[in-house]
Amino acid sequence: MAAVSVSLALALAAGAVVLAAMLWRRRALAAGGAGRVCVVVLGDLGRSPRMQYHALSLARHGRDVALLGYLQSRPHGDVLRSGRIRLVPVSDLQALRVGPKLFQYVLKVIVQAIQLLYTMLKLEQPSYILLQNPPGLPGIAVAWAACLFWRSKLIIDWHNYGFTLMSLTHGRNHPLVQVAKWYEKLCGRLSDHNLCVTNALKEDLWVNCNIRAVTLYDKPAAYFKETPLELQHHLFLKLAKDHEPFRAGITESVSWSGQSSAFTEVDEKSEEVTKARGRPALLISSTSWTEDEDFSVLLKALEGYEHAISEGAKLPSLVCVITGKGPLKDYYNGLIHQLHFKHIQICTPWLEAEDYPLLLGSADLGVCLHRSSSGLDLPMKVVDMFGCCLPVCAIHFECLHELVKHEENGLVFKDSKELTEQLKMLFLGFPSLEGKLQSFRENLRASKQPCWDESWDQTVLPLLGHRE
């Protein structure tokens, strides 16, 4: 009964959206929207790197872009400096605290649909709307309605399924999840073109949703690369103002910011390596602190690593940096504060967009705990790490092999015990320029994959046709 009620409410909301669009004042449509694209993210623009890359690629090809979403975190400077990209803020509506939770959610969706449609129809008419999914509720229906009004084309960029993300909180059989699944599959067919992030997702969209998509793998932006020693040192001086692990490191006579792999570019390599012996290893992970990442796995692995050092293992101490914002950050910070390590320091900063690539390019190892809710998407954080030639230990899920090649560019683990053993094996003899950690880094340096711009030009640009 609840599912029927929600379906009816959503259907009425969708009908109201379409009716509002069709009754809106008419414009001259035949030649309108030439060269303009509306890129829509019903989320934080600053934490939506792929959609920022879309906007930059469109601008590079002479398109005027309205980048629409929540302005909670600052987008990258390249986006802010572009003369062809205009940020269009949307307010992040909180659920109204009136009535049952189901009623609150439905009411929020309806209000959000009206707000989003109003914001979109105030823009200059675009020739395309490029929408990120998830979240697709109510974004897909609203974008489709706006396209009806403008006679524009709708492109959906499928990062995952929204209903599988909802199932992490509510369970797969919850009425809301079932309605979201129905909505996503039905409304997803309204698009003119579809992009997706993996071949596995492309296959699933076709088999289960009758939606044809083109795979556009995530690629790192050009600024994700290994960080020179001088920039590393300046970065750690900056971070040391607020974070003790960096403050302790830079007070040494030689900064520990020199990663072992970077010494290959230093003339007096052997002298630098000798000076760096005993420095902590820099371990980094990034997260949105949501249910699809269980950071207790990493914390338990670090406990095992700490125990190994206490038992006499010749391993370096660790500085573990976990970056990001999200709803579970306070919960995990509470767990971290209960730990009393002697050889491991953990900090959880939020980095500026320009500092994050520099930190990745300075690290010795990355750790990814992303478990895909659908098993069909890949973690962008690993893409960025690979752009910086940073080896990765990543937790296993179904299509991870499309990105992480076990024993080639990193390692795949299934639980905290396996991660502990991998950390011990990789850091044994650190910071020697020999061993698997260095081998993985060399493999990443040697693998010349198409960059984002090349992939985008080959995959997305043909969908847009000629400039009107």
Image: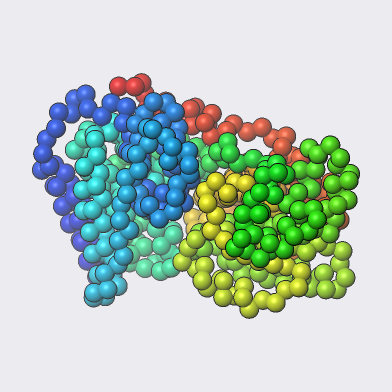
Measured as percent of width and height from the top left, residue 374 is found at: 49, 55
The vertical placement of 57 against 384, above or below, is above
**Where 149 falls versus 374 (above or below)?**
above
Q: Is residue 215 left or right of residue 92?
A: right
For the point 51% across and 63% down, the residue is 289
The reply, left or right, for residue 441 in relation to residue 310 is: left
Q: On the picture, is 4 further left or further right than 252?
A: left
Residue lying at 60% horizontally and 41% vertically, measured from the top left = 224
Write down the quadrant of residue 420 in the picture.
bottom right
Give the percent coordinates (x, y) of residue 52.
44, 41
Q: Position of residue 223 (x, y in %)?
A: 58, 39
- From the image, which quarter does the C terminus lie in? top left
Question: 73 or 132: which is nearer to us?
Answer: 73
Residue 338 position (above or below residue 40): below
- Number of numbered discs on residues: 0
Q: How is the image coloured?
A: rainbow
The answer to whether residue 83 is visible is yes
Residue visible at 66% across and 54% down?
Answer: 236
Residue located at (37% from left, 32% from top): 84
- In this orientation, does residue 412 appear? no
Place of residue 1 in the rendered image (x, y in percent of width and height, measured from the top left): 24, 70
